[in-house]
Image (cartoon, rainbow, N blue to C red):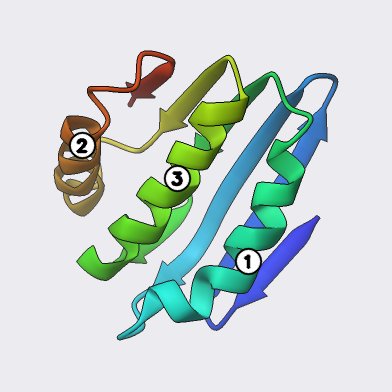
Amino acid sequence: MRYQADDLTIESLPGQDSLVIRWLGRSDGADPSRALQPLLDAVAADLQSAQSVEFDFRSLEYMNSSTIRPILKLIQRASSSATSVRLIYDKSKNWQRLSFTAIGAALTSFGNVELSA
């Protein structure tokens, strides 16, 4: 499935017992929680049957700091239903390295979540 809000696209790519959620474009709105909520609800429905979930942010061109909270909520939902959750980002993009270092710090209490570059 493909979900779109403004300049952001989220692709939900189900496999057998797995789900890849690819983020593309930009999330720079003033209230991304509001704009992203329908997308995140749709993606959350896809999470129900996945044993493993991979969030791929490498094609995300930019996100503002307000986008971090909705992402954390979605990762928390994934963590509660899947046995493993993996976040992949592009460490060569300075803004991604900084943002995902902060996200990784917030996820230390989740034993089934892995952050990789």
- From the top left corner, tell me how far across and down residue 27 is, in percent: 40, 71
Please give the residue where the numbered disc 3 appears in the rendered image.
Answer: 57
Residue 77, placed above or below residue 107: below
Q: Nearer the viewer, mark 2 or mark 3?
A: 2
Label 3 packing within 10 angstroms: few (<14), some (14-19), many (20+): many
For marks 1 and 2, give the CA distance. Answer: 22 Å
User: Residue extending furthest front?
Assistant: 80
Q: Earlier in the sequence, mark 1 or mark 3?
A: 1
Q: Nearer the viewer, mark 1 or mark 3?
A: 1
Residue 111, placed above or below residue 28: above
- Callout 2, which amino acid? Ala
Residue 48, placed above or below residue 60: above
Please give the residue where the numbered disc 1 appears in the rendered image.
Answer: 39
Relative placement, left or right, of 30 versus 44 is left
Question: Does the residue at mark 2 contact the one at mark 3 (Cβ under 8 Å)?
Answer: no
Please give the residue where the numbered disc 2 appears in the rendered image.
Answer: 106
- Callout 1, which amino acid? Leu
Which residue is nearer to you in this view: 69 or 96? 69
- Quarter of image, res 10: bottom right
